[in-house]
Image: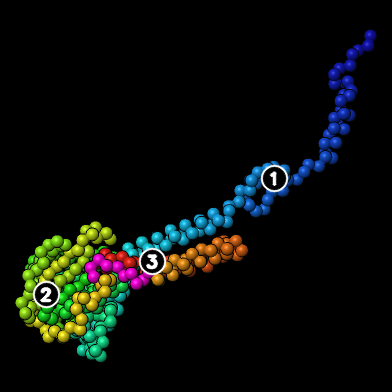
Amino acid sequence: MTSTPSRQDRPDRRRPVLRRLTSRRSTVRRPVVRRPTSGWSHEPVGPAARALPVLGQPERWRFGGSAVVVVGLLLVGFALQFIAVSQVSYVRDQQLALDAYRFQLANATAPVGQTGPDGRLVADGTPVAILRVPAIGLRSVVLQGTTSDVTRSGPGHRRDTPLPGQAGASVVYGRQTAYGGPFGKIAELRRGDTLTATTGQGTARYRVTDVRRTGDPVPAPMAVGDGRLTLVSGASLPFLPDTVVRVDAELVSDPVPTPTPAFGYSSLEPRELTMAGDGTVWPFVVLGLVVLAAMVALFTVGMRLWGRRQTVVVAVPVVLAVGLFAASQLTLLLPNLM
């Protein structure tokens, strides 16, 4: 009787076939798919890439995006210039004006009228007085002229009026909030508060008689030989003044000699009046914007040909410099009492 071989003793007829298939599979080379070295990390390769659209960004979109960024930086720079940098600029200009005026007082060369010793009109921005108002902690150098450019550096004396301490009505403009905001608290003054003004003719003392706003009655005419000082500034919300506040103070010290005026109110330019901007700076504003537009185009090309990092390193300082220049010119278009 013959025994039946077990399953383990039976020869496996499939093994030669499996060996052949395995050897064939090992000899088949799989195609190597190389990943792109640039562009999108998941970019398809092969026939699928021909069917899909290119995901690159059009050049006009890049230029437009750069323009939006530059315009945004310009607006931010304007806000920083008007709100933060202006305060530092005011302190520096006041210190320089104080040093210059002290030198003039010591050498008796400070101007005492509309014209200087040479017979020419006193230039805008020239120091003409030192104003002190203890009630609000004010001590500022008053400059000649009332344009936006002058009031950036300190209170401005209206050129058609006599200097403080002289007979007649002297008028001084000052900003409410920006560039130090020297007159931001004059509305808090009360009748009886005192203030002093030091000029090349000595120190004059005044006493506040009235605080009035637009529409209030004007003060009564002065008698011959009397003097009055009127402080003028913007009122209402900070950086958004919609009215004017005036503080009238009568001269309580003896008036000093008043030189003969060389011109009157009709000779003032519109940019020297209350709440007026300086429209003469428009050419400089346009020039700054044109330069910014040219830089946008130049830097966009530079990013493509030179490289993003190199272009950014060069572009940032240039954009900041031109942006600050354009922002400083834009501030001159705003009211001189803001």
Residue 141 visible in the current orientation = no
N-terminal-most mark, 2 or 1: 1
Query: Within 10 angstroms of label 2, few (less than 14), some, or many (20 or more) residues?
Result: many
Residue 104 against residue 170 in the figure, above or below: below
N-terminal-most mark, 3 or 2: 2
Separation of disc 3 and disc 2 at Cα?
Answer: 37 Å
Query: Within 10 angstroms of label 1, few (less than 14), some, or many (20 or more) residues?
Result: few
- Residue type (three-letter) at the residue carrying disc 2: Arg
Magenta segment boundaries in residue numbering = 273-282
- Residue type (three-letter) at the residue carrying disc 1: Arg
Separation of disc 2 and disc 1 at Cα?
Answer: 85 Å
The percent position of residue 57, horizontal first and vertical second, equals 58, 52
Query: Within 10 angstroms of label 3, few (less than 14), some, or many (20 or more) residues?
Result: many
- Res. 235 image quadrant: bottom left
- Give me the residue at 16% from left, 79% from top: 162
Residue highlighted by disc 3: 327
Separation of disc 1 and disc 3 at Cα?
Answer: 49 Å
Q: Which secondary structure dominates the residues rendered in magenta?
A: loop
Residue highlighted by disc 2: 228
Residue highlighted by disc 1: 50
- Res. 23 image quadrant: top right
N-terminal-most mark, 1 or 3: 1
Q: Secondary structure at mark 1?
A: helix
Magenta stretch holds residue 138: no
